[in-house]
Amino acid sequence: MATLQKLDRANKQLDIINRRNHIVEYHIENNPYYEHHFLSSYNNQWESVPIMTKQDLQRPLKERLSNGFSNKTIYVNKTSGSSGDPFIFAKDKWCHAMTWAQIMDRFSWYGIDFNSSSQARFYGIPLDFIGNKKERLKDWFSNRYRFSVFDLSDTAFEECLVQFKATAFEFINGYTSPIVQFAKFLKRKGLILTDVCPSLRVCIVTSEMLFDSDRSLMQERFGVPVVNEYGASELDLIAFENTHGELQLNNDTLYVEIVDENDKVLPYGKEGRIIITSLFNKAHPFIRYDLGDIGIIEVKENSPYPILKKLTGRTNDLVQLPSGKTAAGLTFYYVTKSVIEESGNVKEFVIEQAKIEHFNIVYASKNELTPEQKVKIETAISQYLEDGLTISYKRVPQLKRSASGKLKQFHSKIY
């Protein structure tokens, strides 16, 4: 990683070109799925390399792995499904190590050491016994304490406050919306978090849009800088806010492009779809991969790192419930685990809160959800949210997308 970061602008661009060409050639030679499905129009020019979508990857993982890789030699995970298109993905172990090297380097800009700094983590967590204990054990080994995003009530935040008083946390990390709600709680209490937890250095938010007003509130109530992160679990850390307040793109392990509606590459400064190539993942192809987000890239004079000037997407409503409980919209990430299958029957889905007690699940799939699948969904919703909620289902050929081309997985109609 250090070698890549020492390259000047000219050598960095040359290195990226060499790596992107190498990864395409590697998957042509070693990945039958990629060769068969994506290279019919390839003519040895980068612009002819087909763009991949999330729907392209919703098939059994074993069909998508490169030759020579198995479950024993790869890192496997699921995407969050925040775009409505969840799927299982893989990275080879070197690629996964490079991902973490990038994350650790960027966090170090703010004095954070992943090997020693204590983390207050606002992420989801499985509620089943085994899954929950696994995550708690990983948190313990990683010197972090996880706060649930499933309950954002004042009672839950009072318990968070007790933990902050008892623990020398150095940084907060997690989903934007629950952390904003915690800041609002502190405002209602008239508290500054560093008065309670003076060891705190920085708050790093991810996965959802960070609005200026929310940043100002968090910085006021936490007493530390708020830093924005943009990433995708299947790829890497895509952009990270540098100490000058710019979202600096990661072009050490990724190649990021902006294209128009016709898949034509746009020049710097023009808005379009964000397309990303993973330069090191040999186990699974992510080549010219369409994230579904819209953005603008700009370059700084003499800098080898472009800047993500604008990003559109990744907003999540809050879930308001009859009991008065509030939860993050990303709660529904965990509901996807009830329906996601390796065979991928449900391709896309959105959840609409029509009334405070009623949710509509609109989904696109090959087949209707079975009664057993519906029971699993409703059980999960009761577990993660609360009892007494009613659910309706609607199967459609295709889900309606926003103007940006992105699906919003959860949408509330009660605000």
Image: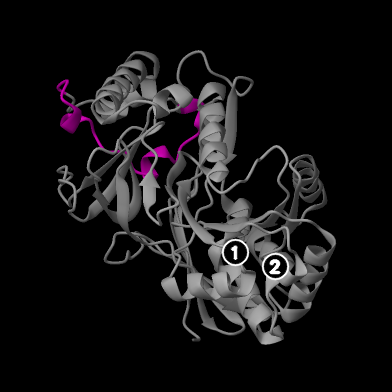
Residue ID at (45%, 38%): 235
**Secondary element type, mark 1:** loop
Q: Horizontal and vertical percent for residue 269? A: 18, 53
Calculate the distance from the C-alpha at mark 2 to the C-alpha at mark 1.
8 Å
| Whether residue 259 is visible | yes
Residue ID at (62%, 69%): 223
Number of other residues with Cα within 10 Å of mark 1, as a class: few under 14, some 14 to 19, many 20 or more: some
What range of the chain is rendered magenta?
43-63
Q: Horizontal and vertical percent for residue 45? A: 15, 25
From what the image shows, is residue 185 above or below residue 201? below
Residue 200: quadrant of the picture:
bottom right
| Residue assigned mark 1 | 224
Depth check: give the residue in front, 135 or 242.
242
Depth check: give the residue in front, 48 or 258.
258
Residue ID at (71%, 78%): 153
From what the image shows, is residue 141 above or below residue 2? below
Tell me: 153 left or right of 71: right
Depth check: give the residue in front, 385 or 305.
305
Q: Horizontal and vertical percent for residue 8? A: 30, 28
| Whether residue 324 is visible | no
From what the image shows, is residue 17 above or below residue 176? above
From what the image shows, is residue 298 above or below residue 181? above
Indicate whether residue 167 is drawn in magenta.
no
- The amino acid type found where label 1 is placed reads Val
Residue 165: quadrant of the picture:
bottom right
Q: What colouring method underlies this structural image?
A: one colour
- Asked if the residue under mark 1 is in contact with the one under mark 2, i.e. CB atoms within 8 Å, the reply is yes
| Residue assigned mark 2 | 194
Number of other residues with Cα within 10 Å of mark 2, as a class: few under 14, some 14 to 19, many 20 or more: some
- The amino acid type found where label 2 is placed reads Thr
